[in-house]
Amino acid sequence: MFNLRTPNKAAAAAKARDIYAMLVGSGWDLTLARFKQEMQRKGVSTVGDFMKELRGHWSGKPKTFEDYCRSFRTILAQTFKIEGGRAKFDYVSGGRDAWVAKIDAIKLADVMPSEVNKWRIAFVKKAGVNPVKQRRARITCNSLMRQAKSLFAEDLLAHVTMHRPEKLPFDGVVFYKRESMRYHSTMDIGTLIHDAIRELPREQLKIFLLATMVGLRRNEIDKLQWTAFRWNEGVVVIETTEYFKPKTSDSGGDVAIDPELVALFRGWHAQASGSFVVEADAEPRNDASYAHYRAQRDFEALNAWMRGKGSTATKPLHELRKEFGSQLCAKYGIYAASRMLRHADIAITAAHYLDTKERVTIGMGDLLIMPGNVVPLAEGRVINQQRLDEEGCARRAS
């Protein structure tokens, strides 16, 4: 079957006549070669061909495009069982390149929605029966699909002519229901700040305070320059610089900071040896196609310190920003938190934080009769009297 690719009856009839005439006069091979070149080309187009053509039409950040490609390759590697082993992390001796080449050689026509859907189901099944692991798997699966699917956005495909797939890989593949991303604080932030001041080296302490008390993201901290501090106004300004561009157009803005924090950083500024707030040996790389951080070693060391303090978060540093938002929400409400977090929409803030400026209870606690073996504590907690007696006996025996 030949697709005449025109709604115009006269044009379609003329093309059909030409196809028939050539078929009668020259046979199938020449007719297919002339009129079905595009179909033949698509039949042999590979994932690598598609990405290469698509890259030429990409006008956004190079890192964003590479993130999309990495997610798509991750899905494909698992779908088509392309095991890279440890070699896929070898960026020096060619192991990574060899693994990527195998994925890029996959025929685009073979990446069917049915295969992607099988991968989606298998991905979560691998998490087992643990509800926590299942939740993480669903979140990760959705994230991978969302990024990979972005390669097939209509505004991008509109410019793809050579290697445009007939059937899009994610057509009809449903995402898992969005998981609750609401943050529940489990840390004693006051104690953590005191410990950080006593225990952390200066550069790690700067990172800690910028995340905890200014609510900055990792890249914002990494590329922050001293010119961002408006000492007299008591604010830190997040804006586009030579080395940094905010995450979104709404991510820029002023963040007011405590006078004590202003004084602390002003003292460090007087001793600074460079233009960046967090000093590091590495230079910023604007051309990096991956998340490059000048202060990577200090970020890793701070994450390790946080885990030593009991953090179980996948990204301990980002948990500090969440705690910043949680504290603001509890004290001043969700609107203030949204402004300080520089969210594009208050709905984003509402999805992550509870507006707990004023805690409300049902107010019927006075109707309860306290059991005889429970002693009320001043803070409103209760403790089992029998356990107190047992602990007292144990101390006397020792």
Image (cartoon, rainbow, N blue to C red):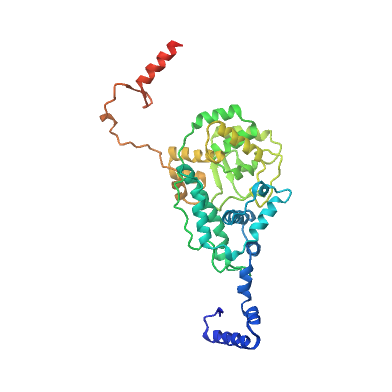
Q: Position of residue 334 (x, y in %)?
A: 44, 44
The answer to whether residue 287 is visible is no
Q: Residue at x 67, y 42 (%)?
A: 294
Instruction: List x then y, in percent, for residue 81.
Output: 59, 54
Relative to 197, residue 131 above or below: below
Query: Total label count?
Result: 0
Front residue (pair 61, 142): 142
Residue at x 61%, y 42% (from the top left corner): 221
Return the residue found at the far right: 93
Work out whether residue 213 or residue 301 is closer to the camera in this orientation and state it: 301
Measuring 60% from the left and 73% from the top, which residue is drawn there? 39
Percent coordinates x, y for residue 184 in the rendering = 45, 39
Quadrant of the snapshot with the N terminus: bottom right
Q: Position of residue 27 (x, y in %)?
A: 64, 84
Specify the farthest residue to the top: 397
Query: Residue 154, can we see it?
Result: yes
Q: Nearer the viewer, residue 233 or 106?
A: 106
Q: Judge left or right: residue 101 versus residue 322.
A: right
Asked which quadrant contains residue 355, the reply is: top left
